[in-house]
Amino acid sequence: MEKVKKIDVIGGGPVGLLFALFNASKNLSISIHERLSKNDLTIQNKALALSHSTIDVLNKFDIKPNQATGFIPISKIHTSQKGSFGRAILSLNENTPIGFVIKYGDLVSVLLEKVCKNSFIELSFSKEIKKVNFSSNNFEDNDGHKNNYDFIVFSDGIGNLLTDKFTFHTHDDFDNLFGLVAEVDSELNHNNVAYERFTPDGPMALLPIDDYRKSTLIWTGEKKKVDRLLALGDTEFKYMFLKNFGERLGSLKLVNHKKIFPLRHQYLNSTALENILVLGNAAHSMHPVAGQGFNLTVRDLNSFNMILEGNKSLLDDQVLNLYQDARRKEMISLMQITSGLVKGFSNNYFGINKLRSIGLNLLDNNAFLKKEFISRFSYGKD
């Protein structure tokens, strides 16, 4: 590979923006191509759960959740299963959140402020990449313009651009699973608690997105069941929520922005090839049950940057090989853990409910296990 002086990044969401902030310098300029307009990108209300490893990375760019707007602290995580008294509550201490939640668009806005101050980053909105010619090292956008590239990075929102170039490892067990997302207002204050509730039909989670009663609900399950949830009127939906989630937050007052999306559990066998690097959901996509997808990607970005700096900012085959070797083990481990959680809690075999209840209570009453569990999902482990 010849010396790389410029990188083209396809996708200007949080992954593409963070990659640029990490790596743009006088020796390496970054050009970002985002298919959405700036307004459409910054109004997206998808909730992102941020672990401490991600917060540590944001601090590197002087983004401090306690000072910036949009970051909602998670005081504790409450995990339970329907039809059982077993539950586990994970927390750190009274003054230290176990994590944060921020809306996708709010995080983009915060990152854009930093990107706009970096003279080595160029950002174009409303530029959808329609075709990539890997043999000729060029790509064509929605305006018909052809752009040559030395090195190209694919982050989120890539469609089928990589289908002919990379091989995906998929889990067929997740082919028929969908998620429903909605913003809900509860009767009672959530007190910044995030909830994970396992039911025989699939997991449901609530992430606080304000300081009072508003949360993002993620309800997953087989497509036909999720379709039925989407079709319910507000009264019926609120009843089904209460029936499955319980009364910890009382009844739901409002349900807004309901939509569904297919769940994917897949990863690339190789995330780098020649002068191409794949990141984010384009590289690995997992069930949202543990809220680890974005945090895993941020650890990927941090690792890549450290390896690149160790190579005196010279992007070559050695950097790509070291990066893949460094990140593959944790990625596969998290994919397996996530898959195991979904399969282990989303069934109702005779006697298994009691075993799961014992497991949750064991976790809840063992300080060492709690510490290890929190550390695993806060900082990852290779």
Image: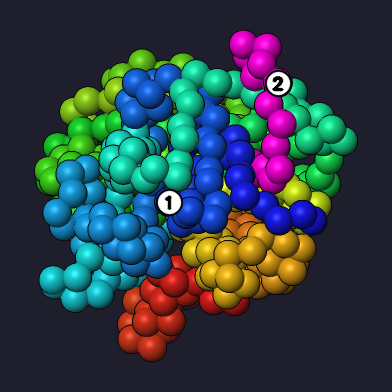
Quadrant into which the N terminus falls: bottom right
Relative side of 351 to 20, left or right: right
> Regarding mark 2 in the picture, which secondary structure is present there?
strand
Viewer can see residue 307: no
Q: Is residue 293 above or below residue 36?
A: below
Which residue is nearer to you in this view: 339 or 62? Answer: 62
Residue in the image at 37% along x and 82% along y: 371
Relative side of 28 to 120, left or right: right
For label 2, the residue is 146
Residue in the image at 12% along x and 43% along y: 212
Amino acid type, residue under disc 1 in the picture: Leu
- Could you tell which of marks 1 and 2 lies nearer the N-terminus? 1
Q: Which residues make up the magenta segment?
A: 141-154
Q: CA distance from mark 1 to mark 2?
A: 25 Å
Quadrant into which the C terminus falls: bottom right
Does 87 appear in magenta?
no
Residue in the image at 54% along x and 55% along y: 27
Residue 265 percent location from the top left of the image: 66, 48
Q: Coloured how?
A: rainbow
Amino acid type, residue under disc 2 in the picture: Lys
Q: Kindly give the residue lying farthest to the front in the view shown.
A: 26
Residue 227 position by quadrant? top right
Q: Residues within 10 Å of mark 2 (few under 14, many from 20)?
A: some
For label 1, the residue is 21
Residue 335 percent location from the top left of the image: 63, 60
Assess whether mark 2 and mark 1 are in contact (beta carbons under 8 angstroms). Answer: no
